[in-house]
Image: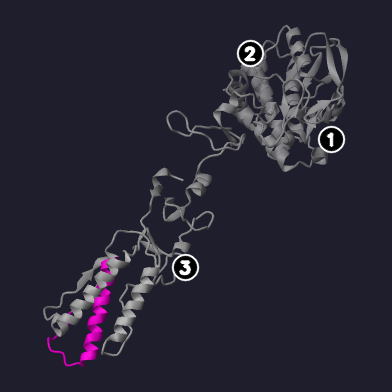
């Protein structure tokens, strides 16, 4: 809501009038009566036709058209008394702003007036006061006598001046106004002041008095800047910060996983085999069959980092390495049995060391455990492209070219899963996994949203190799096709322009 459209009022314009003290009002009213009965008929105006405007009520009295009046005396005196009462009311209306409230003194003054009229030699009658008609802006009924409020050029019964948000009457001296809608100050803050989605408190202003917060570029999660440095857990898959009312699962290696990503997570090597073979079939469907049987292992974070150190020729620039195409002989500890959830952490993991022997240019493919199916598949598609390039004799490619074309295969596989039929490439949605939501190609809305996020990550990667390389490779593939792009890379070591 634009700040220029919002006004905050202290002691809003409230119309109506407090009645003066009993003695003062009685004295003033009796002076009018005295003047009336002393002057008799000589008090009538005999001049021109200009109306008299009395107070804020704009009560109009017009002088008679002629000076002679042949009406009976009783009728004339009734008119004079009416005029005296109206003028007395007009004096009250000229007093400072505030509520007009009836008091016990009003009742006493009314009784005295009644007794005075009954003691007069003339028959009593009921005087009439001329008050302008006011319509309540809330209920559209006449306000009549009693308390009323004035705001935005409109009058309200006090109980009809309500908050546009909670619909309760506004009784405080301060309120917020946006356009023509009035709000309690607290209700307006709830509507407009951003709240942190981690601690669920109002995001505080910084030293300059400005409200400063962080916002995730994909999930639009708003949070206080302090949560980036106060050890708040972040999901290693979707990157969202842990909310104080939703606990994440600790994977035991410094990583945490949110419950939504946990729905389709793959935890051990056996669990990942169907997905791995489905992605190999995906490559074969694009006439890129891998003729060698390459072992694939799901490993812990520490085992993956140790394998990276053992590689002689490796390029790893991502903040978190989640996959590796091995070309050296190593002994790697893989996850043999998936752990189970115990409280907010995983327990009961069973691992097994495995000796990898070099039989070709690729020794094995390693993937980090504990990631959702779509992210695991995207990593496998990327590492399998590394394997295909090495097995097909693509040598000494610079990182932008090799990582860029591998990211293209990762992205197109995600596309085939999230948006089947968008490109003329096979889909692996039929591959089974540990998650029931992914079996038989049926994905939950959460999993589809995660797939969109992983594609968003690839598209907006800022690194030169994974980000810039992907955008150059993707442009070449979109223009010339995958096969012609790969042939050009084989001959020149670069993308076609």
**Residue 350 visible in image:** yes
Q: Is residue 158 magenta?
A: no
Q: Position of residue 339 (x, y in %)?
A: 85, 26
Marks 3/2: CA–CA distance: 75 Å
- Depicted 183 relative to depicted 245: above or below: below
Asked whether the beta carbons under mark 1 and mark 3 sit within 8 Å of each other, the answer is no
Q: Residues within 10 Å of mark 1 (few under 14, many from 20)?
A: many
Q: Position of residue 71 (x, y in %)?
A: 20, 92
Q: Residues within 10 Å of mark 2 (few under 14, many from 20)?
A: some
Instruction: List the residue tagged with mark 3.
Output: 139
- Depicted 160 relative to depicted 210: above or below: below
Which of the two residues, 407 or 198, is positioned nearer the viewer here?
198
The chosen color scheme is one colour
Q: Is residue 71 magenta?
A: yes
The region drawn magenta spans: 63-92
Q: Is residue 92 left or right of residue 208?
A: left
Asked whether the beta carbons under mark 1 and mark 2 sit within 8 Å of each other, the answer is no
Instruction: List the residue tagged with mark 2.
Output: 398
Q: Which mark is residue 432?
A: 1
């Amino acid at each position: 809501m634009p700040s220029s459209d919002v006004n905050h009022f202290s002691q809003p314009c409230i119309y109506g009038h407090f009645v003066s003290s009993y003695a003062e009002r009685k004295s003033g009213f009796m002076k009018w009566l005295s003047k009336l009965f002393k002057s008799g008929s000589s008090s009538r105006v005999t001049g021109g036709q200009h109306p008299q405007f009395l107070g804020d009520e704009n009560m109009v009295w017009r002088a008679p058209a002629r000076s002679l009046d042949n009406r009976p005396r009783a009728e004339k005196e009734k008119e004079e008394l009416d005029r005296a009462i109206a003028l007395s009311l007009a004096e009250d209306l000229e007093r400072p702003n505030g509520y007009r409230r009836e008091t016990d003194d009003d009742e006493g003054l009314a009784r005295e007036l009644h007794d005075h009229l009954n003691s007069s030699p003339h028959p009593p009658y009921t005087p009439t006061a001329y008050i302008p008609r006011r319509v309540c802006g809330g209920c559209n009924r006449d306000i009549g006598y009693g308390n009323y409020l004035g705001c935005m050029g409109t009058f309200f019964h006090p109980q009809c001046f309500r908050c546009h948000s909670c619909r309760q009457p506004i009784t405080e001296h301060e309120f917020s106004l946006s356009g023509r809608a009035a709000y309690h100050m607290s209700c307006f803050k709830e509507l407009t002041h951003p709240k942190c989605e981690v601690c669920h408190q109002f995001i505080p202003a910084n030293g300059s008095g400005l409200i400063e917060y962080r916002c995730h570029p994909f999930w639009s999660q708003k949070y206080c800047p302090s949560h980036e440095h106060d050890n708040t857990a972040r999901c290693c898959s979707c990157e969202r910060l842990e909310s104080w009312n939703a606990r994440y699962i600790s994977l035991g290696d410094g990583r945490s996983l949110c419950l939504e990503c946990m729905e389709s997570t793959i935890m051990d090597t056996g669990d990942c085999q169907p997905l791995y073979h489905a992605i190999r079939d995906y490559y074969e469907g694009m006439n890129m069959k891998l003729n060698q049987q390459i072992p694939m292992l799901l490993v812990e974070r520490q085992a993956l980092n140790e394998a990276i150190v053992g590689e002689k020729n490796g390029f790893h620039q991502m903040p978190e390495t989640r996959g590796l195409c091995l070309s050296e002989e190593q002994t790697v500890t893989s996850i043999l049995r998936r752990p189970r959830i115990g409280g907010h952490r995983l327990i009961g993991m069973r691992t097994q060391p495995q000796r990898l022997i070099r039989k070709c240019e690729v020794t094995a493919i390693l993937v980090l455990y504990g990631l959702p199916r779509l992210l695991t598949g995207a990593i496998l598609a990327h590492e399998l492209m590394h394997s295909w390039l090495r097995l097909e004799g693509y040598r000494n490619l610079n990182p932008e070219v090799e990582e860029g074309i591998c990211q293209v295969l990762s992205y197109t596989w995600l596309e085939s899963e999230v948006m089947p039929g968008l490109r003329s490439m096979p889909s692996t949605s039929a591959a089974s996994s540990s998650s029931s939501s992914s079996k038989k190609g049926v994905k939950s809305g959460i999993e589809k949203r995660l797939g969109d996020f992983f594609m968003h990550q690839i598209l907006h990667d800022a690194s030169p190799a994974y980000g810039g390389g992907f955008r150059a490779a993707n442009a070449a593939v979109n223009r010339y096709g995958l096969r012609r792009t790969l042939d050009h890379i084989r001959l020149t070591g670069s993308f076609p322009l």
